[in-house]
Image (cartoon, helix red, strand yellow):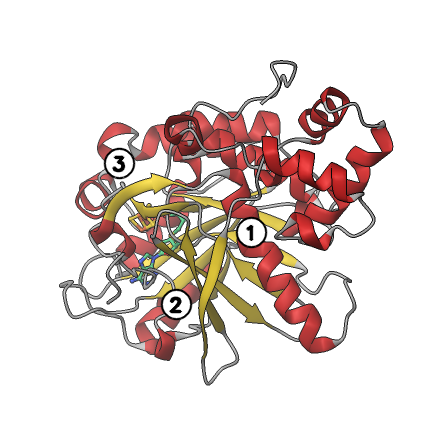
Amino acid sequence: MSNAVTFGPPASDPDALSGRLPDLRGMTRDALTRLMADLGEKPFRAKQLFSWIHRRGAVSFDEMTDLSKSLREKLSKVSRLVLMRLDLTQVSVDGTRKFRFQTEDGHFIEAVYMPETDRRTLCVSTQIGCPMGCAFCRTGTLGLTRSLMPGEILAQIYAVNRALGAEDGLDGRKPLTNLVFMGMGEPFLNFDNLLTALALLQDDAGLNFSRRHITVSTSGIVPNIRRFGELTENKLAVSLNASCDEQRNVLMPVNRRWPLSELMEACRRFPLRQGRRITFEYVMLSGVNDTLEDAARVAALIRGIEAKVNLIPYNESPELPFRSVPQEKAEAFRDFLLNKGILAVIRKNRGRDILAACGQLATKREGR
Ligand code: SAH
Ligand code: SF4
């Protein structure tokens, strides 16, 4: 590689350790422009390359037919496009689809596609496994293998866009309208790579996603809630899941580091644009957090915050001791919040039959 090449992968990039060529998909537009300049190419070539990668979802240099063969060869000597092999697609009776990908180093991650009449949403993973250890979550039982690189986060979106576009005959137009970062992993523990991926998704030479159509969910990494508010204009979801510290300490170990007082303070200070709300996710667990006293404490916690509460039916798994709540009980909880003037909905539970619902993503390296 020429010494003149001045870009480099971020420190959290496993490529930096393995000596692999840097991944172009995870490079900012500026870095790509510098690379092209270092290769002696005109600036408009960088834009072409960017569009191939981010608008058309190219997975190889061979596809980039309007770049000269010699440029494609030069590129492949100094860089690569990180591979995410789409190895399995499963379709639920309700139309939800699970896409399973295999990383270059052999691990599996999953993304979930949820079509609705007015939007098409993809739920994206940010880590292989998750280190947060929430007691009720299957992904949490995996522990963390590693964080995904920006190019691996984006590859999920581009692959699904391509698959749907081919099906619908959309001819390269954007089939996905919304993204939620609620798949495997804690996005705010892969913060820099998350921000890089968001910037690339929102670039007008790429998919040009609008900021309000992207939501990131966190278990409550308080310092990064603040940074997220400062550095982006995307929507925030917070997994609350409990009405007091005693409960939350047991359900979500993160609460012992950042208790509810600090979490709610960060939410209260989170900059919200006109008409926006913070979404609070609340998984309903039978006999744990499902009483009207809990509902009253939740109402008190979020008082003064422009909020929406998403009550999530619990998806049971045989190896975990928690049970779901009967519909009437969830409705009583919701109605209590509504009567307090708090927007609350019981979320539809989608993709359960293919283990694609919340907290069910847990394919290990060896398969299930
Ligand atoms: N790690 C991030 C985002 C991924 S988890 C976070 O925790 O916010 C996405 C949501 O699924 C969280 O709100 C979590 O509380 C919820 N969840 C986890 N396990 C679940 C299960 N078994 N049933 C229903 N929801 C679950
Ligand atoms: Fe990780 Fe979110 Fe599951 Fe907790 S709920 S273990 S933070 S994926």
User: 339 and 5: which one is in front?
Assistant: 5
> Closer to the camera: disc 3 or disc 2?
2
**Where is residue 68, by image quadrant?**
top right
Separation of marks 1 and 3 at Cα, in angstroms: 32 Å
Residue annotated with mark 2: 357
Name the residue type under label 2: Ala
Residue 342 at least partly seen: yes
Check the image and name the residue furthest to the bottom.
93
Q: Residue at x 73, y 24 (%)?
A: 39
Could you say where residue 236 lies in the image, as x and y percent from the top left?
53, 42
Could you say where residue 292 lies in the image, as x and y percent from the top left?
30, 60
Could you say where residue 139 lies in the image, as x and y percent from the top left?
29, 54
Residue 240 at least partly seen: no
Q: Residue at x 74, y 48 (%)?
A: 52
Residue annotated with mark 1: 155
Name the residue type under label 3: Asn
Separation of marks 1 and 2 at Cα, in angstroms: 21 Å
| Quadrant, the N terminus | top right
Judge left or right: residue 81 versus residue 219: right
**Where is residue 246, by image quadrant?**
top left
Instruction: For ligand 1, tell me if the residue under mark 2 lies within 8 Å.
Output: yes
Mark 1 or mark 2: which comes first in sequence? 1
Name the disc covering residue 169, or none: none
Classify mark 2: residues with Cα within 10 Å, few (<14), some (14-19) or many (20+): many
| Quadrant, the C terminus | bottom left
Badge 3 element = helix
Whether residues under marks 1 and 2 lie with C-beta atoms below 8 angstroms apart, the answer is no
User: 44 and 127: which one is in front?
Assistant: 44
Name the disc covering residue 255, or none: 3
Could you say where residue 82 lies in the image, as x and y percent from the top left?
52, 44
User: 360 and 322: which one is in front?
Assistant: 360
Classify mark 1: residues with Cα within 10 Å, few (<14), some (14-19) or many (20+): many
